[in-house]
Amino acid sequence: MIRDIIAIALYSLRTNKLRSFLTMLGIIIGIMVIVLMQAAIEGFRQEVQQQINSMGTSSFVITRTPAFDHGNWEDYVNRPNITADLIPPILRNCPSVTGVIPILENWNEEVRFKNKRTEKNVKVMGAAPGWIDVTRFEISEGRYFSDYDYEYNQNFIIIGKSVREKLFELSDAVDQYVFVENERFKVIGEFKAKGMKFDDDQDNFVCITDYHYRRLYGKERDTALLISAKSYDLVPKAMDETIMALRRERNLKADDENNFDLITKDEINDKMSGIIGMIYLVALSIGGMSLLVGSIGIMNMMLVSISERINEIGIRRSLGATKKNINFQFLSESVILCFTGGAAGILLGVVFSKLISHFTNYATSAPVWTITVAFFVSILIGILAGIYPAFKAGNLNPIDALRQE
């Protein structure tokens, strides 16, 4: 019996293909938007988490201003810069700290090679010993800075793939000489390509030692310090020691506030979780509105279908069909419509997310739980949108239904 009712429901939908498709369109778009945005958000979350993890589990950052909740900017504008001069006192007075690496970056520079030059959009990075271990960059050609290079302040440079392609095209870059800020550097290596992320070319940069960075841009330029504790358990102790060392170095009194800020991995995680949660809420709202419109469309189509098939309902009731049979038939049509639309939306969402990953190098990821939830949501919408039409059809008077033309 149930198989026959479902077969009748499928036949009814097939006889009105265009109307069924147009009715499903809202569900298709709603489910597709939810899956696509979920895949994009999940890819963004994984990328952010990867960047946060690059700090290390036992690290924190010293900055001049807070990373979040700036409040009144005037409270921070007169703070002294964070410079590399603070590294020796931190290492000397903080037994729980194993290393301090300055984060040295200068944007919008030009790199020249003979008569060729890049646009003024190259990032120059200063690398202290241990920098490559923290940033997890890899060398594809040549080599990285050696201890000898640091000890004797060699004029060496390592370039990203985008810079190499602009200046050297297909020729070898290693052992050639380039100019940054009219300073000549010998190319000793090339970083492995990382591609585009969030519309940002991650390979459009060059790297010099921290000594030459300070020579080019000055020792007093504001930076940030990445500090590594001996272990994760010692992070709170290392933070306390660092605060005390910086306060002594800056001659702060007991009642003076800190003129610097600490940023921990957990704090960044909490803030990013809040931001991603808001993005999820917006995505669900957009998809939910489309699903609401789609469910109204399905309910409307089912009500129209009842008015067109009143005579059929009367015949079936006269042949022994019960109210439950009629209810189940129309509810089945509603569920099948939504299920089919949901399946199409999921398929389109996954396909579009893969196309985005392929053409933009932006990683997207549609988790299995998202697809599973999308299926159940589409079925639930079918049930909710079909309940009223199904009961209306089942409650028709058989005699009155037979009299309808």
Image (cartoon, grey):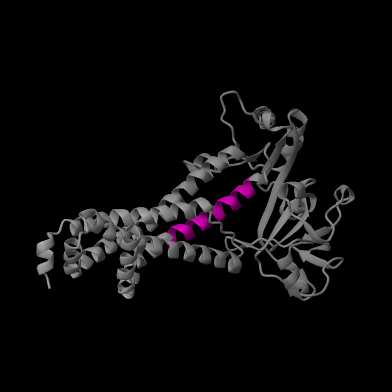
Q: Is residue 44 magenta?
A: yes
Q: Is residue 278 left or right of residue 98?
A: left
Where's residue 53, x and y in %?
A: 65, 45
Look at the image and tell me whether residue 294 can be seen: no
In the image, is 136 to the left or to the right of 362?
A: right
As for residue 98 lying within the magenta part, the answer is: no
The magenta segment = 32-52
> In the image shown, does 40 or 303 lie closer to the viewer?
303
Identify the image quadrant of the C terminus.
bottom left
The answer to whether 275 is drawn above or below residue 188 in the figure is: above
| Placement of the N terminus among the 4 image quadrants | bottom left
| Left or right: 385 in relation to 365 | left
Q: How many marks?
A: 0
Decide if residue 320 is on the left or right side of residue 64: left
Residue at the image point whose x is 9% and y is 64% from the top: 400
| Residue 286 higher or lower than 405, as above or below | above
Kindly report the secondary structure that dominates the magenta region of the rendered protein.
helix
In this view, the residue farthest toward the top is 254
Question: Residue at coordinates 75% horizontally, 72% vertically from top-left?
Answer: 167
In the image shown, does 303 or 5 lie closer to the viewer?
A: 5
Q: Is residue 265 visible?
A: yes
Residue nearest the observer in this picture, 16 or 25: 16
Which residue is at the far front? 319
| Whole-percent x, y for residue 356 in the image | 55, 66
On the image, the x and y values in percent for residue 360 come to 59, 66
Residue 99 sits in quarter: top right
Front residue of 43 and 323: 323
Q: Please provide percent x and percent y for residue 271.
A: 52, 43
